Image (cartoon, rainbow, N blue to C red):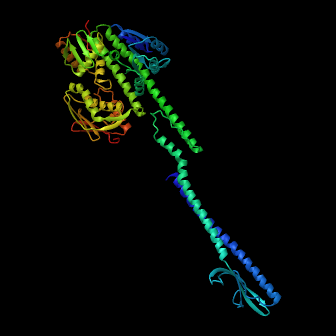
Amino acid sequence: MKILVIEDEQALLESILDYFKGDGNICEHASDFSAAVEKISLYSYDCILLDLGLPGGEGLDILTRLKELKKNDGVLIISARHSLDDRLAGLDLGADDYLVKPFHLSELKSRVTAIVRRKNFNGENQIQFQEIKADLGAMKVEIRGQVVPLTRKEFELLVYFLSNKNKVVSKNAMAEHLWGDEMDMSDDFDFIYTHVKNLRKKLIEAGAGDYLRSVYGIGYKFTDQ
Amino acid sequence: MKLATNYNRVNIVTSTVVLICTGIVYYLFIHSILTDKLDKDLVVEEDEIQQYVATYHKLPLPASFINQQVAYSVFDPSQPERELRYTSYIDPKDKDEEPGRSLFTTVKVGEVTYRVVITKSRVEAEDLVRVILLITLGVSLLLLTALLLINRFFFNRLWKPFYSILQKMKSFEVTRMTGIREESTSIDEFIELNASVNAMAERVHRDYRELKSFTDNASHEMMTPLAVINSKLDSLLQTEEFTLRQGELLQDIYQATGRLSRLHQSLLLLAKIENNLIPDIQQIDMAVLASSKLRQFQELFEKDDLQITADIDKLEVRMSKYLADILLNNLISNAVRHNIKGGSIEVSLKGTMLTVSNTGNAEKLESNSFDRFAKSSHSEGMGLGLAITRQICNLYHFDLGYAYHDNRHFFSINFSSVS
């Protein structure tokens, strides 16, 4: 997918570009308002990651520009402003999603993939990974045509892993993705382990390969390499 | 009492008193003028009689002219020599008794002193006074009626801009960025009031915007470095295989940044609640929300083998969806965090009362538990949960209560003040 990252914080920009690199993704970036406007008027992107606090202009104006240009690019707002007004204003202006800083890169990737998938819908909202086929519309997973009975949480977890394949996903990121970051949880994520264990067992029993690796107490990696 | 009513009362009482006084003075004055004129006529008549007597040395005939009678009698020295008096006048034609004015005087014919009584009818004068009085009364009544009508209708119209401005001030909400509209009026005072109110609203809006942009900027400035740390951690995680020790260290850093961002968000939230900056007030179905929260916490309950009992009735509450979410999150996560292995949690929503009770440490919470950063020594939380809970309850005037009995902690919220 083709992605434009509009972010003025250099360190954060590098991390994002680094994380999205590979896997056939093309990433471009803009660090200020005018560069961003230039990019969006010249090219089309599958998804634009837009930081609202931009030097040289108001981030929300980029959305207005996109509308004026009649572009259909997906937009994910990333902002440090945890303000409902901004969130609503952004979504009203045609943004597809809103992510508050600080966020996990895995969460960002999963949201971007979801937006791109929705934009390129074409009748089938599916992810294919080797023999695993996840149907997001029907919330159903099939392995070689056979349905794997997953709970809702296990399904969400699998989709999260598939959006972040070949990446190490931390337990914190998984917990926040599945239960929301406002649920002030205790610091131990044993219950994540249970869900991951069950998911892995069900996939293997249905005939899939063992793709889930535990990474030294920090998190997990879903990979076929 | 309304200003108009108050003013009306004074106005009408004063008008009535002044009109009555004027009427009385007017009556007395005209009466005395007319009496004076009658008296002059009587004196002229007296002079004529005196001259007649002086010329002819005999009394003139006791003639009776229109509205005037003259009578003679022998003078009785016990009576006063000359006086003017109100008497009655008998109309010679129809023998009607009319009010009259008489001049009693004496005249000397030779050696005999006669008493002369000249009487004039006062009917015409009285009629005149009556007509004048009636006209005065009529005009007064007309004036009073006009005053009343003016007060009732004109005043109401005159004060309409004032009440309209008042209404707008009452419904003024700082979170809505609407100004107070100009009220079209030609009254200087109201124009000034309107301008002042508008200026005030503008100032309030400006302060509000400044405060809002300050909290936003503070959040932004602190969240950006945190976001960098977090993203670098995520990137670091991808670089290579770690030893178990390195993994533990990374996990600790993750934990700390997570707590820092939650802490910061909680503080910002507190500030926002205090400044009433959370606008999305709507009708919340508490029963649905509570049930979904319990489902959301399922894994946490299972982890500590907690027994959950829920008894939830229907209840609708008007508040921010966001805050309702946080309220329940805080109550339930508190009940989980301060629980014991294999303990229990009871959630009940009865009437307007939401109660969350849990087993836990066998000691009552200190009264400062609702303060910021107040936490027991064995607590893992940040000590902001209850402070936020109380702040939310304060904002909507809900009753937040705490009790400890039968080895259970009870937190209850009474939503009755709004529903």
Residue lying at 27% horizontally and 41% vertically, measured from the top left:
B351
Q: Position of residue B402 (x, y in %)?
A: 29, 38
Q: Does any portion of residue B62 appear in the rendered image?
A: yes
Front-lying residue, B5 or A190: B5
- Residue lying at the far front in this picture: please name it: B93
Q: Residue furthest right?
A: B55
Residue B46 vertical placement versus A200 (above, below): below
Tell whether B115 sits left or right of B222. right
Q: Position of residue B304 (x, y in %)?
A: 21, 26
Is residue B7 or residue B181 the one in the foreground?
A: B181
- Residue lying farthest bottom? B111
Name the image quarter holding the C terminus of chain B.
top left
Residue B344 found in image quarter: top left
Q: Which quarter of the figure has residue B233?
A: top left
- Across and down, in percent, residue A90 comes to 42, 23
State the residue in front, B378 or B144. Answer: B144
How many marks can you see? 0
Q: Is residue B244 visible?
A: no
